[in-house]
Image: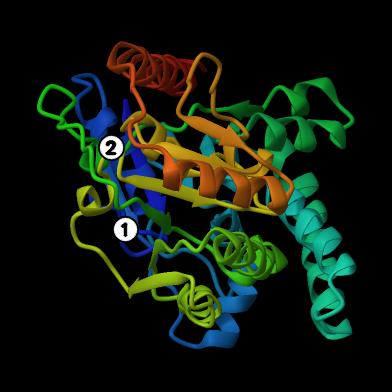
Amino acid sequence: MNLAIVTSIAPNKKNTGGPSGLIWEIQELLKQKSDINVDTFIINSSKNKYIAQLNTWGFYRGKYKNSLEKYDKILLYPDFLLGYMPSKILDKIIVLAPDASSMVGKRKYDVYMKDKSISIIKKLYQYLYYRRFVYFEKKYIPKVNKYIVVGENDRDWLRSYLRIKSDKEKVVFLRHPLLSYSMVDLEQVKFSDSKDKRFIFAGDMRYSYVGLNIKEIADKVSDKLNRINKKINIIVVGKNNKWIADIFCKKKELNVEYYTWIENYQDICNINTDIHCVPLITGGGTKNRVLTALANGLNIISTNIGIENIPIEGLNNVKVANNMNTFTDEMIYFNQLKYSKIDLIKIKKFRKLIMDEFYEIMNCIIYKK
């Protein structure tokens, strides 16, 4: 089988430059197949920010120039690249969305409507984005071979407004794989008994995803710490997350460190020391930061949005708190916790479950006609 991967996000084992780790894992899996020849083509994003924004909306400028007709199947990542593809090859295309763009847009719009600090223009923009992708998905899903999302909620959302059964069946949930570069060696792991806990805020935490929750966390946790005369350590990672560090730095009870990038993920992956905080209000698909942290045995505090599409049953290292008063209570609890026993057997089983489902579904998608 000849298979092409067409992507605007270059595959990268370290998951840099956007969500590049997902497509890297898929590419490497396919390359291991002796009966599949894989060619990868990168579509460079336009340097013009206005054209790039139109592309993100599913509009395009011109057609894809390389001929893809010789390929039996074409894996396309992400979904908006469909706008570049000639109509005669659409039935060969397997789209890796990876989220239902319309669902994410609708969730953001609902959050914006409740946030008085968001302007009418931004609210209108988000509404138009949501409606644009409803149109886009309705137009293209019936024409392609498969449409893959890494969220069960995303899959159900898309199927809900596709009228024909055969179209609904084209939408497939793929279990998001563990990114191999981010996995710690569980055989060599050392359990820390340090009293200095660190609360990690990392990943894509732009305002539209965590918004007012960050402000509420800063206020509530500082008030609670003030009452018990304690301080906690917070680490914020990400070039777009400086606004979070700025809010936390205003509170004297919070010792804040900010890094634009951490080269070695394991530097913020110390069992019994690092607690990853994911106070998401909105989003879609599988949150890789949460999946990775759970697979490495770290303690997690998350909202339901943060842990959706992840099988957390049986894991005792995750706390779910949608209310920020409860969320900050969990932060205080973990900060005072001397030692938390991690069941490595459960973590290994969790890893195996995730990867077994990923392999099974990928094989079914690629080989099924």
Q: Position of residue 46 (x, y in %)?
A: 46, 79
Question: Residue 25 occupies which quadrant of the picture?
Answer: top left
Q: Earlier in the sequence, mark 2 or mark 1?
A: 1
* Tag count: 2
Q: Position of residue 122 (x, y in %)?
A: 79, 80
- The answer to whether 289 is drawn above or below residue 120 in the figure is above
Tags 2 and 1 touching, CB below 8 Å:
no
Crowding at label 2, few (<14), some or many (≥20) Cα neighbours within 10 Å? Answer: many
In-image side of 226 versus 258 (left or right): right
Q: Position of residue 323 (x, y in %)?
A: 74, 48
- The answer to whether 139 is drawn above or below residue 37 in the figure is below
- Give the image's coloring scheme: rainbow
Q: Residue at x 76, y 22 (%)?
A: 166
What kind of element bears circle 1?
A: loop
Is any atom of residue 87 visible in this view? no
Towards the viewer: 323 or 329 = 329
Q: Nearer the viewer, mark 2 or mark 1?
A: 2
Is any atom of residue 140 visible in this view? yes
Give the amino acid at mark 1: Ala
- The answer to whether 336 is drawn above or below residue 189 in the figure is below
Question: Residue 36 occupies which quadrant of the picture?
Answer: top left
* Spatial separation of the CA atoms under disc 2 and disc 1: 31 Å
Give the amino acid at mark 2: Ile
What kind of element bears circle 2?
A: loop
Towards the viewer: 47 or 164 = 47
Q: Quadrant of the N terminus?
A: top left
Crowding at label 1, few (<14), some or many (≥20) Cα neighbours within 10 Å? Answer: many
Q: Position of residue 195 (x, y in %)?
A: 29, 47
Q: Which residue is mark 1?
A: 10
Q: Which residue is mark 2?
A: 271
Q: Residue at x 23, y 37 (%)?
A: 193
